[in-house]
Image (tube, helix red, strand yellow):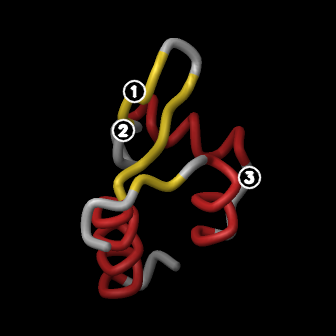
Amino acid sequence: MPNEILRLPKVIALIGMSRSWLYAEVATGRFPTPVKLGTRAIGWRRSDVEAWLTSRSSTGDA
């Protein structure tokens, strides 16, 4: 599914980092911004997270 929305636990499992690290990176613009799903719900596009992971592995920042 190219437009699948991933919730926080799945994103954390995929990237292998903590929640606080993730939000700090979003705040500085170094991680994709989440999509607002509702009043109190957010998620990340799978394609954005996978593109970020690919860019990290190609630059050696993993």
Foreground pick, 20 / 11 = 11
Q: Nearer the viewer, residue 41 or 62?
A: 41
Q: Which residue is mark 3?
A: 18
The reply to whether dot 2 and dot 1 touch (C-beta < 8 Å) is no
What is the quadrant of residue 60 in the picture?
Answer: bottom left
Q: Is residue 43 left or right of residue 17?
A: left
Q: SS of the residue at dot 3?
A: loop
Instruction: Report which residue position mark 1 lands on.
Output: 36
Q: In this picture, is 60 found above or below 53? A: below
Residue 59: percent from the left, percent from the top? 32, 81
Q: Residue at x 59, y 71 (%)?
A: 14
User: Residues under labels 2 and 3: Cα distance?
Assistant: 16 Å
Among numbered discs 2 and 3, the one appearing first in the sequence: 3
Q: Residue at x 36, y 38 (%)?
A: 33
For marks 3 and 1, give the CA distance: 20 Å
Q: Nearer the viewer, mark 2 or mark 1?
A: 1
Residue 48: x and y in percent read: 30, 59
Decide: few, some or many residues near mark 2? Use Cα within 10 Å; few <14, some 14-19, many ≥20.
some
Dot placed on the residue nearer the N-terminal end, 3 or 1: 3
Instruction: Specify the amino acid type for callout 2.
Output: Thr
Nearer the camera: disc 3 or disc 1 = 1
Q: Amino acid type of disc 3?
A: Ser
Indicate the secondary structure of the residue bearing disc 1.
Answer: strand
User: Label 2, on which residue?
Assistant: 33
Looking at the rendered structure, the secondary structure element under dot 2 is loop
From what the image shows, is residue 7 above or below residue 60?
above
The part of the image, by quadrant, that contains residue 54 is bottom left
Residue 22 located left or right of residue 59: right
On-image quarter of the N terminus: bottom left
* Residue 13 picture quarter: bottom right
